[in-house]
Amino acid sequence: MTETLNWDHTMVDVTNLQDAIDYFNSKGLAFTPGGHHEYWGTKNALDYFGLNYIELLTVANKEKAKAFPYENNSAIHDAVEDYFAGIQRITTIAIRTDNIEETHRRLKGLGLNVGDITDGKRIDPAGKLIQWKIFYVDDELVNHLPAPFFIQWSEDDDKRREDLKKQGLIKFHPAGDLFVKQAIFNVSDPEEVAKQWSALLQAEVVSEGDTYTINIGNKQLVFTAGVENRLFKLIFHGAKQPEKLQLGQIRFDLLDKK
């Protein structure tokens, strides 16, 4: 069995969801409220760039957010910890798979501590039930870099794209015909981190000097030297005018490249 893997979305922690929506939308993005996750006590807002999207995540119910364990929920748990610490930053990315059981089996075979495959759901503002299967990696990567998590939606890509367009969620942005092109990881050991991601994604690493790049679809994960050991910023192409956006430690660079 084989898997097709794509960069599904990027999780971004914010302390005040409406303030974050207002800031980014004032810069030409188009976030809209997504819905609530009852188990985690969280809520989100989403902005789509084709099927790839950005999720702003915050705490909606402090009691529920403090109650769920790290195991099987690692990325959400990290986001909640950031909320209570007053930190706003990019957490990690989600990888979309068309065969989540095979992806799960393969990563277990690599010796990773992967959580169980679980069913996820939320109700969107229009009352539509959104469903998916998901699992988290309960191991951190080199130097505590958060691992990606893996998701399979209940509908295939073509059906989801059609539905999202009908709902007006895939749309043109005031800032331009934007799409997310690169995730820039600033890490203390770019070569080793790139090797880890290469194994996770079954993808080749391309090196140029001290920079290591993995292509995933028409997008790139770029690993460069830095002290943060985090996904440091997102690079967008298609902007009408170049602009650098920053909210807390969240960095989006809008470039006027096609």
Image (cartoon, grey):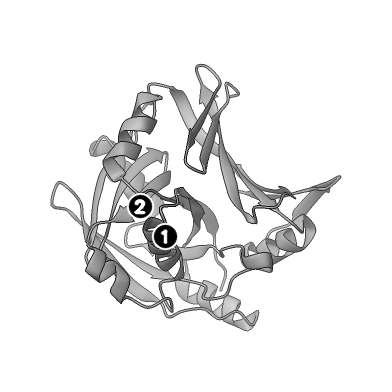
Q: Is residue 175 above or below residue 214?
A: above
Q: Amino acid at mark 1?
A: Ala
Q: Position of residue 155 (x, y in %)?
A: 32, 58
Tell me the residue at 46%/79% (across/down): 115
Q: Are marks 2 and 1 in contact (CB under 8 Å)?
A: yes
Foreground of the two, 155 or 258: 258
Which residue is tagged 1? 79
Foreground of the two, 121 or 4: 121
Q: Would you identify the image quadrant in which residue 171 lies? A: top left
Q: Is residue 170 above or below residue 93?
A: above
Q: How far apart are labels 2 and 1 at the CA level?
A: 7 Å
Foreground of the two, 46 or 110: 46
Q: Pointer 1: residues within 10 angstroms few (<14), some, or many (20+)?
A: many
Task: Tally the numbered discs.
Answer: 2
Q: Amino acid at mark 2?
A: Leu
Q: Is residue 182 above or below residue 120?
A: above
Q: Residue furthest front?
A: 85
Which residue is tagged 2? 57
Left or right: 92, with 85 as reference point: right
Q: Pointer 2: residues within 10 angstroms few (<14), some, or many (20+)?
A: many
Q: Secondary structure at mark 2?
A: strand
Quadrant placement of the C terminus: top right
Q: Position of residue 247 (x, y in %)?
A: 45, 37
Q: Secondary structure at mark 1?
A: helix
Residue 21 in sight in this render: yes
Give whichever of discs 2 and 1 has the lower sequence position: 2
Q: Position of residue 141 (x, y in %)?
A: 64, 68
Residue 217 in sight in this render: no
Quadrant placement of the N terminus: bottom right
Tell me the residue at 14%/46% (across/down): 126
Q: Is residue 172 above or below residue 84?
A: above
